[in-house]
């Protein structure tokens, strides 16, 4: 089953909307995981250790940190990059759809944009 980890920059309304739509989804906020103020590389390591897909708004730095993470031969359950301007309900519905219709291995080592699910491709 897919579990999500919110980056510190994710709007809390998204976490709450997902939890409201599907009570059984395990979606940890940054506060829940004590990640507020943690650097991106450490957040990626934490999400990998915990087996959680990271959900972030941070397109400015997270894409490069994710690329570096993979180049260091580290694994990732995946990263979902969410536009800060995306509607909360659309993002929440996309996360619930992902949770209900896929397995965590479907997203391994991928960075996807939500709600569109287009992807960044990184060569190894």
Image: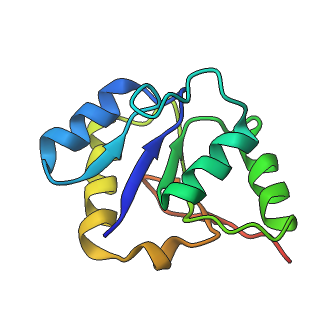
Q: Position of residue 89 (x, y in %)?
A: 26, 39
Q: Which residue corresponds to the image point at 36% horizontal and 65% vertical from the top-left?
A: 2
Q: Which residue corresponds to the image point at 57% horizontal and 62% vertical from the top-left?
A: 78
**Residue 97 makes an appearance in the image:** yes
What is the count of numbered marks?
0
**Residue 79 makes an appearance in the image:** no
Q: Is residue 46 above or below residue 31?
A: below
In this image, 6 relative to 111: left or right?
Answer: left
Q: Position of residue 64 (x, y in %)?
A: 82, 48
Q: Position of residue 111 (x, y in %)?
A: 62, 60
Q: Quadrant of residue 77?
A: bottom right
Q: Which residue corresponds to the image point at 60% horizontal and 48% vertical from the top-left?
A: 46
Q: Position of residue 85 (x, y in %)?
A: 48, 30
Q: Is residue 18 above or below residue 24?
A: above
Q: In the rendered view of the protein, which quadrant contains the N terminus?
A: bottom left
Q: Is residue 123 above or below residue 86?
A: below
Foreground of the two, 3 or 11: 3
Foreground of the two, 103 or 89: 103
Q: In the rendered view of the protein, which quadrant contains the C terminus?
A: bottom right
> Farthest top residue?
37
Foreground of the two, 82 or 54: 54
Q: Quadrant of residue 57?
A: top right
Q: Which residue corresponds to the image point at 56% horizontal and 23% vertical from the top-left?
A: 36
In this image, 22 relative to 119: left or right?
Answer: left
In this image, 75 relative to 102: left or right?
Answer: right
């Amino acid at each position: 089953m897919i579990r999500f980890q919110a980056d510190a920059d994710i709007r809390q309304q998204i976490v709450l909307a997902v939890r409201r739509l599907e009570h059984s989804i395990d979606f940890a906020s940054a506060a829940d995981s004590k990640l507020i103020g943690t650097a991106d590389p450490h957040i990626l390591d934490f999400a990998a250790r915990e087996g959680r897909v990271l959900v972030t708004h941070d397109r400015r730095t997270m894409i490069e940190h994710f690329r570096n993470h993979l180049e260091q031969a580290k694994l990732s359950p995946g990263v979902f990059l969410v536009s800060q301007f995306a509607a909360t309900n659309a993002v929440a519905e996309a996360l619930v759809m992902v949770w209900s219709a896929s397995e965590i291995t479907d997203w391994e080592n991928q960075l996807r944009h939500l709600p569109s699910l287009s992807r960044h491709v990184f060569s190894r």
